[in-house]
Amino acid sequence: MSADPVERARLFAALISSDEGARAILLALPEVFPWTRHLSTEEVREFVVDLVNATHDVADLDVHTNLHRVIVEWRATARILADPDLTAQLTTPLPDEDHGEVPAP
């Protein structure tokens, strides 16, 4: 019999609350989320913090949408970083020209 998602989230939240558990999560991250290899060390830390907070939402509030959103958004970031041309396009500074206020649609 498998645990329900809330029980799994509680287990994950308990695991990451210790230094040993946090290290285990960091070691397992590339296997569970292979795309994290495209993130910097700081971005991986941010992803883990977001993952932890979203996991607490599942465990404490039974709200799953935040967890899904965190994973989808960070995977999209990794997808951009994996493509050097796309990264260059999206990180190029915008011109300093001010074209005025944008009217409401």
Image: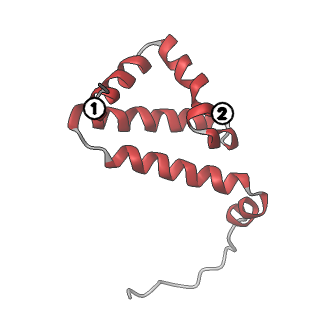
Nearest to viewer (mark 1 / mark 2):
1
User: How many numbered circles does the render carry?
Assistant: 2
Image height of 73 relative to 97, above or below: above
**Amino acid type for the residue under numbered disc 1:** Asp
Classify the position of the C terminus by image quarter: bottom left
Residue 69 image point, x, y percent:
41, 51
Label 2, on which residue? 41
**Picture residue at 57% right of the left edge, 30% below the top:** 29
| Front-lying residue, 88 or 70 | 70
**Amino acid type for the residue under numbered disc 2:** Thr
Residue 86 image point, x, y percent:
72, 63
| Front-lying residue, 104 or 55 | 55
How far apart are the alpha carbons under marks 1 and 2?
Answer: 32 Å
Q: Which mark is residue 4?
A: 1
| Front-lying residue, 32 or 54 | 32
Image height of 21 relative to 4, above or below: above
Q: Earlier in the sequence, mark 1 or mark 2?
A: 1
